[in-house]
Image: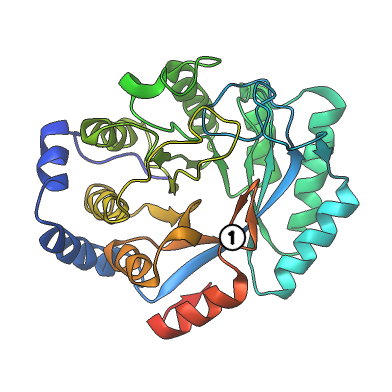
């Protein structure tokens, strides 16, 4: 994870973002091919170790205990269950597994030791391991770095100005503090956001600006399109134009050329042509599998067919 080598400028980002879309995609595609193999897509599989009963009040999330989303009792997987799912992913050609848990803070004591054991179990299968489990302490970050995780996901979600419209159980400043703890302990950071939660264009530009102001370049930036979930405050929100995601990806590729960009939740609702534009504009990672936590994902067989059409290879 490299230190950013330039001084960020929000006006410059705004200028890039607001360029004509095809002109923007053309430049982003050139930048992408200079820093990545444009015919390769990194594939990851998300495994939810703990699903539901989260104390946070993120307005987009079915796992919050504040909302009645029909999720039922929380489900916690054993190490053996995680191993089975990781093995299935490996047999399907997946090389990276992201272990997710609906915690506000990653737990201490035995629960944390169990997490470290899960990481070891999956790594022993010759798979890369990423984590997304909430806020971490410095001691925990050191332990995760020693365990050899590939990256830790902690999204900023949106702009600082819009953040309190979506989440009040944690501040934007706390998000950044967690990212700093991870980076200070040499853990690669995966951090991005969700598009289509009611934010405006300036919020999206400011979110991108924040990602460039982190003390180190994010290893991956996951970008999600909101999937409205019944029972959450955002259940009736109007869907954004999918081309807005293309614009965001293209801008991000230009301003953070070496960062991986992951087209994440909501991809299953996108037309193949839109996804193709996203990959041309610089997206070089996806999650595979039928589900992402509690939301649907593109069926693997459909993905295989699409990537074959586009001449893209999953790695």
Q: Position of residue 45 (x, y in %)?
A: 64, 59
Above or below, 110 relative to 271: above
Q: Position of residue 163 (x, y in %)?
A: 40, 22
- The residue located at (46%, 59%) in the rendering is 269
Q: Position of residue 59 (x, y in %)?
A: 52, 27
Left or right of residue 211: residue 298: right
How many numbered discs sit on the rendered protein? Answer: 1
Left or right of residue 285: residue 248: left
Q: Quadrant of the N terminus?
A: top left
Above or below, 85 relative to 73: below
**27, 48: nearer the viewer:** 48
Identify the colour scheme used: rainbow
Q: Which residue is mark 1?
A: 44
- The residue located at (16%, 66%) in the rendering is 26
Q: Residue furthest front?
A: 236
Q: Position of residue 81 (x, y in %)?
A: 87, 53
Left or right of residue 250: residue 167: right
**70, 107: nearer the viewer:** 70
Above or below, 84 relative to 129: below
- The residue located at (73%, 34%) in the rendering is 52
**74, 23: nearer the viewer:** 74
Mark 1 crowdedness (10 Å alpha carbons): few <14, some 14-19, many ≥20? many
- The secondary element bearing badge 1 is classed as strand
């Amino acid at each position: 994870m490299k230190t950013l080598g330039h001084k960020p400028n929000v006006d410059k980002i705004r200028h890039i973002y607001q360029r004509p879309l095809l002109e923007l995609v053309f430049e982003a595609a050139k930048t992408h091919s200079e820093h990545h193999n444009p015919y390769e897509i990194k594939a990851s599989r998300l495994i939810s170790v703990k699903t539901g009963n989260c104390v946070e009040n993120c307005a987009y999330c079915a796992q919050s205990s504040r909302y009645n989303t029909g999720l039922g009792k929380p489900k916690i997987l054993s190490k053996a269950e995680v191993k089975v799912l990781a093995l299935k992913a490996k047999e399907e050609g997946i090389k990276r597994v992201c272990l997710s848990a609906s915690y506000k803070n990653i737990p201490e004591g035995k629960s944390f030791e169990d997490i470290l054991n899960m990481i070891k179990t999956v790594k022993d299968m010759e798979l890369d391991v990423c984590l997304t489990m909430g806020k971490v302490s410095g001691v925990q970050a050191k332990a995760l770095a020693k365990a050899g995780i590939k990256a830790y996901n902690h999204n900023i979600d949106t702009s600082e100005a819009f953040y309190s419209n979506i989440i009040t159980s944690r501040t934007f400043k706390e998000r950044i503090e967690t990212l700093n703890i991870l980076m200070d302990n040499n853990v690669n950071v995966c951090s991005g956001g969700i598009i289509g939660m009611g934010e405006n264009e300036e919020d999206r530009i400011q979110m991108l600006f924040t990602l460039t102001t982190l003390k180190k370049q994010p290893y991956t930036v996951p970008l999600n399109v909101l999937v409205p979930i019944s029972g959450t405050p955002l259940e009736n929100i109007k869907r954004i134009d999918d081309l807005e995601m293309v614009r965001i990806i293209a801008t991000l590729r230009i301003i953070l050329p070496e960062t991986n960009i992951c087209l994440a939740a909501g991809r299953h609702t996108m037309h193949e042509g839109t996804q193709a534009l996203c990959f041309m504009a610089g997206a070089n990672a996806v999650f595979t599998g039928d589900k992402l936590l509690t939301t649907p994902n593109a069926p693997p067989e459909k993905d295989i067919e699409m990537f074959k059409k586009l001449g893209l290879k999953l790695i």
